[in-house]
Image (cartoon, rainbow, N blue to C red):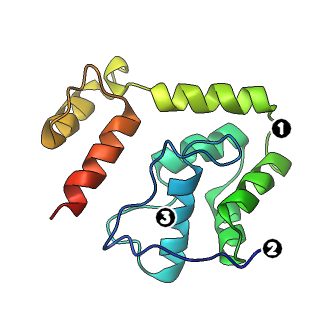
Amino acid sequence: MTTSNTAKDLTKEAPSSPRQRVGGYVIISRMTDKGRALLNGTLGEFHYDCPLDNLLFGFKGVKGDDVKAQLAAGASDEEIATWLDANGTPKTPAEVAAWSDGSEGFKPVDNPDMKEWFEGECAKVGLDAATSTLFDFLEADDRVSYAK
């Protein structure tokens, strides 16, 4: 395993965009940034093993603690992607691509259980909830939070 456990200080900078793909997976770089920051004590107000991270963990059928153990051992993002390919529920590259595309395009306003929450959160960061994806919101929230 590569010793690449360079943790971002999430009290001072945002984690990676959830759109950034590694091994075809969205969310992975943001999740690993949060996992490393947790291990390093620099997580700030972010959460590792949160609902967003669990979209990835659930898709692959793995646990956050198992991924965290890989991060603690120094795994790079690429090594985490390779580990995901080898563990949990087997997925073809086409399935990973379809899941990543669907996750990137997810609009919480279309989900009745999330609509009101998402409209309120989008209003706080100046987005139109009707046209925004979850990833649009996360990126805008990061920009607002770190513009201070």
Mark 1, Cα crowd under 10 Å, few <14 / some 14-19 / many 20+, is some
Identify the image quadrant of the C terminus. Answer: bottom left
Find disc 3 in the rendering and name its residue.
34
Q: Quadrant of the N terminus?
A: bottom right
Secondary structure type for disc 3 = helix
Q: Dots 2 and 3: beta carbons under 8 Å?
A: no
Q: CA distance from mark 2 to mark 1?
A: 22 Å
Q: Residue 43, percent across and down?
A: 41, 72
- Report the amino acid beneath label 1: Pro
Give the amino acid at mark 2: Met
Indicate whether 83 appears above or below 109: below
Image position of 19 (left or right of 91):
left
Q: Secondary structure at mark 1?
A: loop
Q: Residue at x 52, y 31 (%)?
A: 103
- Sequence-wise first label, 2 or 3: 2
Pointer 1 residue: 90
> Which residue was labeled with disc 2?
1
Residue located 21% across and 39% down the image: 121
